[in-house]
Image (cartoon, coloured by chain):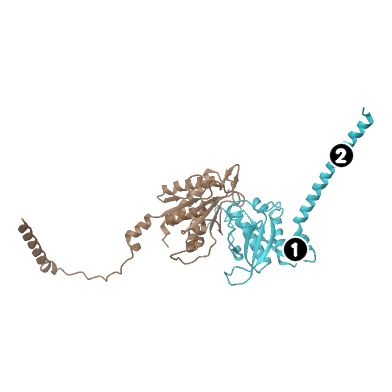
Chain colours: A brown, B cyan
Amino acid sequence: MRWIEAAALVVAVAMAGYAHSSSFSQIPQAPQLPQAPPIPPMSTPTASAQIQQRFLVVVDAAHGGNDIGARIGNGVLEKDITLGLSARLRSTLRAHGIEVVMTRQTDVSMPPLNRAETANHAQAAACLVIHATATGSGVHLFTSALGPTATARFLPWQTAQSAWVTQSLKLESEIDSALAHAEIPVSLGRASVEPMDSMTCPEVAVEMAPLVGGHVTEVRAITDASYQKSVVDAITAALEQWRSDWKQP
Amino acid sequence: MISRFQKYLFFAMLLACVVMAAFLIRLRNRAQDRLQAQAAAAPAAMASVGSSLKTVILYVPNDLDDSLTTVERSLPLPADGNAQARVVLESLMEAYRAPASTHPINVASGVNDVYFLAPQDRTGEGGQMAVVDLTGALAAAQPSGIEPETLTLLSMMATLHANLPAVTEVHFLIDGQPRETLAGHADLTRTYLASEAEQRPSPAMPAGAVR
């Protein structure tokens, strides 16, 4: 049987050679396009799609365990408010197709180092550090007080956020606009609060305060479910907008 | 047999002892209060000796709109820089504990002392680093939160820089010891640039404002 296989192979090669030299070769060749330079792996459509699919938000519920945070009043502790608000935010974001990683999901102590590690490992498109206070009115947005620097391969741990400060300010602006659209008073500021300076992602600290005084027509406690929902909805809208704008720095 | 007269005398003397003891305890408490008040007013007393009345600028925070408002006060300032800084900061603490304060912190004395050092050479502009030693009572009375704690630090930094322009950096201690945060949020491990107070939070926009 071997000679039959060899003969078939010879016939096939001969037919292929004939086809190439006669009829097919007479078809005019399309002009050859200039050869594109080699594309780095991260710029290929497949890689871009992977980045789009990796749009992930880290939600850091501040405090926890022995670290109770602020006493909001009537026995309400900041650590409980931040955890509840973070869980609510996670549910809403997931309902809008945004992947979420939380630094803590229960009432446990977590050092700032571990929080930053979780956020940095996730390579998140946005990091939100959730706080609450009994002082002031509306929502306070804070970004790191570090000055912006260029992105580098290696960054000092204590000032790693400096390479993302410009992105963080843009993210803060998105959230600010969404909260203002929801008629929630907003204040913007820069602050030095752990673990913000060590996070390598666009990050904003969202500190929720009661609605009191100023231009507020209705006093609403920080524990008010409808008030929390309006804040969460506004942040979700801002992150949806951020998803369409965001590019990996 | 004890006579009736001796019994009366004994009880009268016992009563006199009790009254005298109560009187002495009251006198002691009053003297202690007076000494504490003198200690709290030490900078003012120090300022009033051989010092002239000067206008100082205080940056008073407002919790509701996240702003710092400038307030001018005339104070007798001592010649010594450390004492000047302490007098100015104590005057700021008075604004904190005023009945209609927009940033209420109810503490009798918030500053133990202020020291001046050569700055960590980061800007190359020279100047001085002020090390502000705050009292534990201030840290305990400070409302917890990023906003209130940051406003307290910014108001002290801005006030120091406005009245002592040579101060370019500020570091905070609590009762002479380094501490991680003021009241759970604002980082006290780092040295602040006095110019950071210029990046203070903007006033809150009214609800429903169009941006």
Foreground pick, A82 / B5: B5
In the displayed structure, A16 sits above or below A217; it is: below
Question: Residue A224's x, y, as percent?
Answer: 55, 43
Q: Are marks 2 and 1 in contact (CB under 8 Å)?
A: no
- Chain to which the residue tagged by mark 2 belongs: B
Q: Is residue A91 visible?
A: yes
Mark 1: few/some/many CA within 10 Å (<14, 14-19, 20+): few
Residue B30 x/y as whole percent: 81, 48
Relative to B176, is A104 on the left or the right? Answer: left
Q: Quadrant of residue B112?
A: bottom right
Q: Is residue A209 above or below residue A43?
A: above
What x and y, as percent, mark residue B49?
80, 64
Q: Residue A104 appears at what percent x and percent y?
A: 48, 48
Residue at label 2? B17
Q: Nearer the viewer, mark 2 or mark 1?
A: 2
Q: Residue at x 84, y 42 (%)?
A: B21
Amino acid type, mark 1: Ser
Q: In the picture provided, is B78 more to the left or to the right than A225?
A: right
Q: Chain of mark 1?
A: B
* SS at circle 1: strand
Query: CA separation, marks 2 and 1?
Result: 51 Å
State the count of labels: 2
Three-letter amino acid code of the residue under disc 2: Cys
Identify which residue, A40 or A223, lies in the foreground: A40
Residue under label 1: B74
Residue B66 seen = no
Q: Residue shown at 62%/63% (left/top)?
A: B170
Q: In the visual, does A244 lie left or right of B10?
A: left
